[in-house]
Amino acid sequence: MASLLIVALSPVMLLVALLVRCTSRGPVIFRQVRVGLNLRVKRNDRRDPLNREGLPPPGVPEHRRANTDRRAESSFGKLFVLYKFRTMQVDAESPGACFAVAGDPRITRVGRFLRRTRLDELPQLWNVLRGEMSLVGPRPERPEFIKELSAEIPGYLHRLRLRPGLTGLAQVINGYDNNLESFRKKVALDLLYLQNCSILNDLKILLRTIGVILTGRGAL
C-alpha cells in the first residue's frame, strides 16, 4: 500500500517540495531521529523496571556509567531516521529541543499549510517501505523526550510494543501533542489501540485520517 501511495501521490509530493524550496531557505526534507519498535523488553523481567526507563543498574561504578548510559539511550526501542517535509526555519531548534505550540513563530507560512493538511508527513511512506514504520500505529517519539515522558506517564513504554505509524487512533482524535496532558491522552488512546489492533480498525483509522486531512482538525 505504501508503494502504491508513493506512486499515486508523487505529483503532490513534487509540488510540496517545490513550495518548500521556493518559500524558505534550507533543505526540503527534514530528518530527525525517532524511537521505533522495542523487541528487547523481556515480558517476565519485573525485577527492576527502572532499568527499562533508561537508568543505569545499581552498583555500576561511576567510570562505567557513561558507557551504560549510551547503551540505555536506545534501550527504549530501535532508533531510526524519520523523514518529513520541512515546516520550520532551519535554525528552529538551535536553543534546544522543544515542542511546537499554537502560533509557533518557527513554523513557516507554507509549513502551517502542510501541518494543517498533514502533507508534511508524506515522506514517511519511505519509512514504511523500509519497515521502520507502519501505516497505522503510535506516533514515534524523539529520544530526548521519552525518558521524561515515561517517568511522568504510567504505561508510556507499552506503546513501543507496536511499530510506530504514519497515522493512528491518537492522531485522528487528539491531534498534535504539545503539553503533558495531551501526551497523557495520547498514551491512553495508543494503549486502547494496542488492545484492539486489527485490520478492520486500521481501515477505520485510515478513513478517519482522510477526514482530518480535509478539515485540518488538531493542527498547530
Image (cartoon, grey):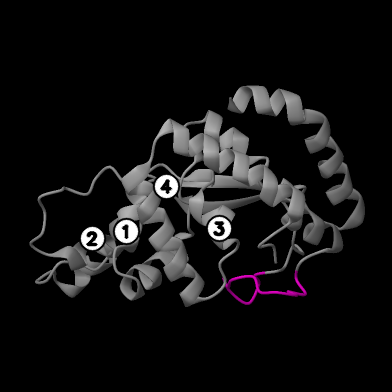
Amino acid type, label 1: Leu
Q: Which residue is mark 4?
A: 36
Residue 36: % across, % down: 42, 47
Q: Residues within 10 Å of mark 3 (few under 14, many from 20)?
A: some
Could you tell me if the residues under marks 1 and 3 are in contact, i.e. CB atoms within 8 Å?
no
Sequence-wise first label, 4 or 1: 4
Of marks 4 and 3, the one in the foreground = 3
Q: CA distance from mark 4 to mark 3?
A: 21 Å
Residue 112's x, y, as percent?
Answer: 79, 61
Q: Please, what is the three-letter code of the amino acid marked with disc 3?
A: Ile
Q: What secondary structure is marked by label 3?
A: helix
Q: Is residue 158 above or below residue 100?
A: above
- Do the numbered discs 4 and 3 sit on residues whose CB atoms are within 8 Å? no
For the residue labelled by badge 4, is the local secondary structure a helix, a strand or a loop? loop
Which of the labelled discs sits on residue 173, or is there none? 3
Quarter containing the N terminus: top right
Identify the residue under disc 2: 52
Q: Earlier in the sequence, mark 4 or mark 3?
A: 4
Mark 1–mark 2 contact, CB under 8 Å?
yes
Against 63, residue 18 (above or below) is above
Q: x, y percentage for residue 77?
A: 35, 50
Residue 47 figure quarter: bottom left
Q: Residue at x 24, y 45 (%)?
A: 40
- Which residues, given as a range, are shown in magenta? 93-106
Q: Quadrant of residue 218?
A: bottom right
The residue singled out by tag 1 in the image is 157
